[in-house]
Image (cartoon, rainbow, N blue to C red):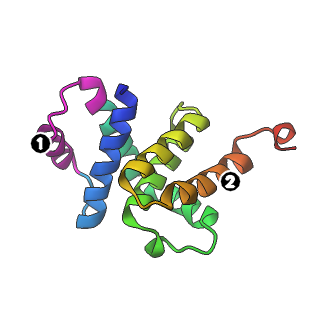
Amino acid sequence: MGKRNTGRKLAMQILYQAELSKHPATKEMRESFFDHHQVVLVETRSWASELVEGVNSHQKECDALIKKYAIGWSLDRIRPVDLCILRLAFYELLYTDSGHGVVINEAIEIARRYAAMESPKFLNGILGKYVEDRCLPVSSRE
């Protein structure tokens, strides 16, 4: 498994822990998590931390997009793990150089491992519609 792939999974777990505790994912929380899970590679820790910090900083923007594209779903109806995966994916789509195909595939793979059986399809629909609306040239939508 790659450093970025592992970093995404760790970031989602940290965000999930923070979501359940209703407290932001602080640096201390991240470091404790990394130590407990014996994350040794500096690059993996760094990428996971960047993602968590980014989601924390841009949660309002990510949540606004989730509300817009999760048609008929309020944030409080979305399972916490799905919400964390969506926030992470939207942050990556908006603020990193990760390719949109990679981001969606990674979100689906994380959902397959950590979320409910129907979650991958749910997340794919939301993220796919966003990418279709915002990221793909008009000519490729035909």
* Residue at the disc numbered 2: 129
Q: Is residue 56 magenta?
A: no
Left or right of 38, for residue 97: right
Of residue 26 and residue 122, the one placed in the foreground of this image is: 122
- Please tell me whether mark 2 sits on a helix, a strand or a loop: helix
What residue is at 24 percent from the left and 63 percent from the top?
Answer: 23
* Residue at the disc numbered 1: 36
Left or right of 38, for residue 86: right
- Can you say whether 132 is above or below 3 in the image? below
Mark 2–mark 1 Cα distance, whole angstroms, equals 37 Å
Q: Main secondary structure of the magenta part?
A: helix
Q: Position of residue 24 (x, y in %)?
A: 27, 58
What residue is at 53 percent from the left and 40 percent from the top?
Answer: 105
Residue 124: image tag: none
Quadrant in the picture for the C terminus:
top right
Is the residue under label 1 in contact with that under label 2 (CB below 8 Å)?
Answer: no
Q: Is residue 43 magenta?
A: yes
- Report the amino acid beneath label 1: His
Of residue 128 and residue 112, the one placed in the foreground of this image is: 112
Answer yes or no: is residue 55 visible. yes
Q: Position of residue 106 (x, y in %)?
A: 48, 40
What residue is at 42 percent from the left and 61 percent from the top?
Answer: 116
Q: Position of residue 104 (x, y in %)?
A: 55, 43
**Sequence order check, earlier mark of 2 and 1:** 1
Left or right of 74, for residue 80: left
> Which contiguous range is marked in magenta?
26-45
Answer yes or no: is residue 58 visible. no
Q: Position of residue 88 (x, y in %)?
A: 44, 48
| Disc 2: CA contacts within 10 A as few (<14), some (14-19) or many (>=20) | some
What residue is at 26 percent from the left and 53 percent from the top?
Answer: 25
